[in-house]
């Protein structure tokens, strides 16, 4: 994925997070050094942004791309939080975005399987 695109998504997500969740204006978050952030910092922000936009499938694809690159407990935990957030959605919300509870449970299982198989090789 294009690094500039990801940086723009993150900057936008931080602004949305600041306004919606923390009820603060963006000026208070100017000290965030996006360039110093790593995948583990960026991934939850990106997944949150895509979830807010209803892009559950895209978020899931990005999650598994990262998990394949770096199958670790940290990424798995980010994935678990993502899926737990989706579990709070109604069936109608999920279906509207072409997602289902079955996919959520399968995704959680796949994360665990990837983590387990990674630990077998190390």
Image: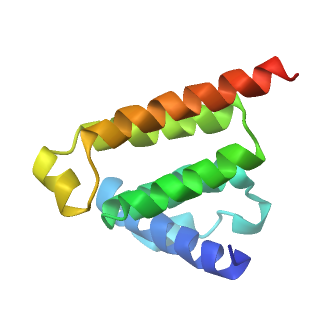
Tell me where residue 22 sits by quadrant.
bottom left
Residue 43 location, x and y as percent?
Answer: 59, 53
Give the side of residue 33 with respect to residue 107, left or right: right
Give the side of residue 78 with respect to residue 39, left or right: left
Question: What's the residue at 56%, 33% (across, down)?
Answer: 111
Residue 89 location, x and y as percent?
Answer: 20, 45
Whether residue 27 is visible, yes or no, is yes
Tell me where residue 65 sits by quadrant.
bottom right
In the rendered image, the quadrant that contains the N terminus is bottom right
Give the side of residue 65 with respect to residue 9, left or right: right
State the residue in front, 38 or 114.
114
| Figure colour scheme | rainbow
Which residue of the protein is positioned furthest toward the left in this rendering? 92
State the count of labels: 0
Is 16 located above or below residue 41 in the figure?
Answer: below
State the residue in front, 31 or 85.
85
Residue 71 location, x and y as percent?
Answer: 72, 37
Is 92 located above or below residue 83 in the figure?
Answer: below
Question: What's the residue at 75%, 54% (across, down)?
Answer: 38
Question: What's the residue at 25%, 62% (across, down)?
Answer: 97
Question: What's the residue at 35%, 42% (across, down)?
Answer: 103
Is 41 located above or below residue 18 in the figure?
Answer: above
Whether residue 23 is visible, yes or no, is no
Residue 21 location, x and y as percent?
Answer: 33, 54
State the residue in front, 47 or 65.
65
Tell me where residue 3 sits by quadrant.
bottom right
In the rendered image, the quadrant that contains the C terminus is top right
């Amino acid at each position: 994925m294009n690094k500039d695109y990801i940086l723009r998504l993150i900057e936008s997500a931080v602004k949305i997070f600041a306004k919606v969740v923390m009820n603060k204006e963006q000026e208070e978050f100017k000290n965030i050094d996006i360039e110093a952030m790593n995948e583990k910092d960026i991934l939850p922000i990106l997944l949150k942004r895509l979830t807010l936009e209803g892009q559950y499938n895209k978020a899931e694809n990005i999650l598994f791309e990262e998990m394949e690159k770096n199958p670790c407990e940290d990424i798995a935990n980010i994935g678990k939080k993502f899926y737990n957030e989706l579990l709070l959605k109604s069936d109608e919300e999920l279906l509207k975005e072409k997602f289902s509870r079955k996919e959520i449970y399968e995704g959680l299982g796949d994360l665990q399987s990837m983590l387990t198989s990674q630990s077998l090789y190390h």
